[in-house]
Structures are given as C-alpha cells and as structure tokens.
Image (tube, helix red, strand yellow):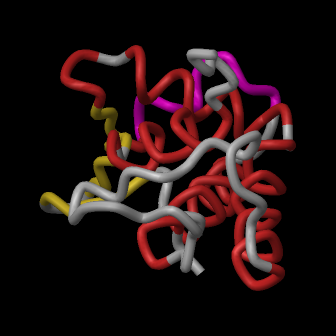
C-alpha cells in the first residue's frame, strides 16, 4: 500500500498532515502499512536510489542515469525502483523508450511529520 493511502491517525487535512508518533499512537493497521514503507527505505540500494533521484535536477531522473555508481544489474535496479514506487516514495512516467522517476514530496513530508519529535511543551 502506498503511503498516500495509509490510514494514519491524526490526519487533519487533504495535505495529509499527520500527528507525530509521540503525540498519538498509530493504529495497528497504520503501523503495519508504514512498516512496508520503512522496509522499502531500509535497503541501502533503495535508499541510495531515492537519494540519487531526489538530488537530481528537478528531483527527477531517467532510469538510464540511475545505473551509474551501482555495482548491480539493470534488472536489479529496476526491481528496487519498483519497490520504491509501490511504497509511494517515487512515481514514474514513460517517455519514449525511457522511464523517468521522480520523488513524491508529499510522501516524504508525511514521513517527516510522522517522525517529528520536536514538541512545544
């Protein structure tokens, strides 16, 4: 399930703002769904791929640009990109014979807000 479809507690607006973990516990369903997103991020190759796409101009990169710097095959890179896409962290668009991947800023914002521990006391 992608993060944009997660039944997070504390959703307050269409922009998917969430309550930080320290303010309100997650439901069992939300925790299970979020575990999948964190699992996608827990792999070093996927974390690097997300970073490469995020740091690329316009936070978008062609799959042909993503192979450089990785000592793995193109099919393995494609698999990792698929996992990130299914987790809702990346989206993709085919242009001719190439696929372009872009970061989903709303998903990253949502994770950031969820983990935000800065609480005004």
What's the residue at 82%, 63% (across, down)? 35
Q: Residue furthest front?
A: 121
What's the residue at 42%, 68% (across, down)? 4
What's the residue at 33%, 33% (across, down)? 61
Q: Is residue 30 above or below residue 83?
A: below
Front residue (pair 101, 42): 42
Which stretch did the figure color magenta? 64-71
| Left or right of residue 12, residue 15 in this image | left
| Left or right of residue 17, residue 97 in this image | left
Image location of residue 88, percent across then percent down:
48, 62
Identify the image quadrant of the N terminus: bottom right
Front residue (pair 5, 23): 23
What's the residue at 77%, 52% (across, down)? 38
Image location of residue 113, percent across then percent down:
52, 37
Q: Is residue 77 magenta?
A: no
Front residue (pair 2, 61): 2
Number of numbered tags placed on the structure image: 0
Q: Residue furthest left?
A: 96
Front residue (pair 29, 81): 29
Image location of residue 118, percent across then percent down:
63, 17
| Left or right of residue 102, residue 44 in this image | right
Identify the image quadrant of the C terminus: top right
Q: Quadrant of residue 84?
A: bottom right
Q: Quadrant of residue 72?
A: top right
Q: Main structural element of the magenta stretch: helix, strand or loop?
A: loop
Image location of residue 71, percent across then percent down:
81, 27
């Amino acid at each position: 399930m992608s993060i944009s479809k997660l039944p997070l507690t504390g959703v307050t607006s269409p922009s998917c703002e969430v309550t930080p973990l320290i303010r309100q516990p997650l439901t069992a369903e939300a925790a299970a769904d979020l575990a999948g997103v964190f699992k996608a991020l827990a792999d070093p190759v996927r974390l690097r791929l997300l970073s490469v796409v995020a740091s690329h101009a316009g936070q978008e990169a062609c799959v042909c640009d993503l192979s450089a710097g990785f000592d793995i095959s193109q099919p393995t890179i494609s698999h990792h990109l698929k996992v990130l896409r299914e987790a809702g962290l990346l989206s993709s668009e085919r242009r001719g014979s190439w696929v372009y991947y872009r970061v989903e800023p709303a998903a990253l914002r949502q994770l950031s807000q969820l983990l935000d521990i800065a609480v005004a006391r």
